[in-house]
Image: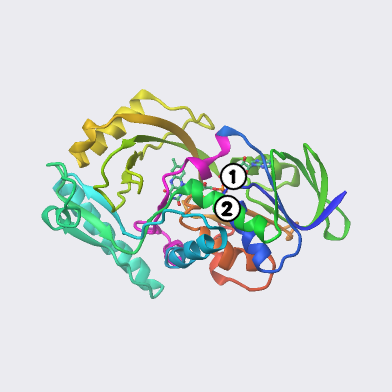
Amino acid sequence: MISADVIVIGGGISGAATALGLVKSGAGKVLVFDEQLPAQRPSRGNFGLTWFMCKGANNPSYARWCRMAIDQWPDFAAELEQETGYDLELEWTGGAIQAFDDEQYQAHAKSIEILKNICAEVDLDYPVQMFSREGFADMIPDIELGRDVTGVMYTDRQGHVNPLKLLAAVRCALQQKGGEYFAAHTVSRIVPEKEGAIRVETTKGNFRCGRLVVAAGHGIPKLLAPLGAKVPIYPQRGQLMVSERYDRVLDIPFLCTRQTPDGTFVIGLSTEDTGLDDSVTMAAMKSQAANAIRLFPILKNLNWVRSWGAIRIMTPDGAPIYTKLTDYPNITVLALHSAVSLAPLNISEIAPWILEQQESSMINHFRNERFNV
Ligand SMILES: Cc1cc2nc3c(=O)[nH]c(=O)nc-3n(C[C@H](O)[C@H](O)[C@H](O)COP(=O)(O)OP(=O)(O)OC[C@H]3O[C@@H](n4cnc5c(N)ncnc54)[C@H](O)[C@@H]3O)c2cc1C
């Protein structure tokens, strides 16, 4: 049986970035096993925002965690690009959310006030502000805002990235540094053995490790059930659609619409409770297209060439679950939404915490036990 120091189950952005962090932190031999089911690939099907705005309104620890991640993003991307030669297409041009009427404008302004206060509790600023329609129009002179837009919530401290290139670069860096990535290796069983060893049974044979990281997205509950552990995640579908290429007219990403450096527009902000069904529907596409056209009327002239659904990994309070199992402290579970935005922390914080190289009082806020009330 092949042995490793650490096995990571799941080669999405959480598992791959954590594995890279483990290798960089000197964990020894690190293996990643990744199943390949279409319904379990949010790391390939996401919107690509690297974003903190509006996150943590009910949770100062999460607000701070998101800011930490976003502050690390430019250096994280530069290092990955330098190590792998990939261009992640990161644009650090901020992020925006429109208001379509005065009521929405006031609600956005109020949410900024609330988050400023929440962040102040943990000595953090919240660099987000409202712009009038005219003020924001000056920032995007090449594209016209729809007439319903009354104003825009904006921060200049975040951006967007090509999520496919991000995932490829992280996996590439992992393997360059000696980590091993096994595609199409489904883990069927986790078996704790004597003296802390863990046997990991896969469709292609059995392996043994001293530490295990379970970053298997929606595959987590099935893997943990035989160990008596429950992680309360639930699926939420989002549908995205992509246009033909167009002149580059918008470099600030909006929450519902962004233009990529190659000129395509990506739109999507739907949320549906459809289990693990990742299909697309005409109703959701019509509705989000209408919303995007209301924001930027020029979009009505474009052909839409591709669409897909992807399943978010949601937790009851929206914040990540980072937890070591009580009965098996050498098994760590990572389950979260916004794993693209939070990716730098897998390397700087999560990996050293898994290896017990550094305590992190921040990570304790995200233990699974917070849901045992
Ligand atoms: C529509 C949509 C838009 C989003 N937009 C954004 C965004 O703009 N910004 C942002 O930060 N986040 C965004 N997200 C969230 C982000 O995509 C997810 O948080 C992230 O992809 C989760 O990554 P993960 O690695 O934890 O899980 P996954 O990507 O699900 O990876 C888990 C991997 O584990 C594998 N696996 C499962 N079971 C097993 C098993 N038994 N054995 C081996 N392998 C297994 C799966 O096949 C999969 O490859 C979005 C998500 C959706 C759905």
Circles 2, 1 touching at the beta carbon (< 8 Å): yes
Q: Residue at x 26, y 32 (%)?
A: 302
Image quadrant of residue 123?
A: bottom left
- Determine which residue is flagged by label 1: 217
Q: Residue at x 18, y 54 (%)?
A: 106
Residue 34 percent coordinates (x, y): 67, 43
Which residue position holds label 2?
A: 14
Quadrant in the picture for the C terminus:
bottom right
**Dot 1: within a 10 Å radius of its alpha carbon, few (fewer than 14), some, or many (20 or more) residues?**
many
Q: Secondary structure at mark 2?
A: helix
Is 282 above or below relative to 268?
A: above
Residue 162 point in image, percent of width and height:
44, 49
Identify which residue, 15 or 122, lies in the foreground: 15
SS assignment at label 1: helix
Compared with 370, 290 (above or below) is: above
Q: Is residue 56 magenta?
A: yes
Amino acid type at image mark 2: Ser
State the separation of the CA atoms marked 2 and 1: 9 Å
Residue 332 in picture, x, y percent from top left: 67, 57
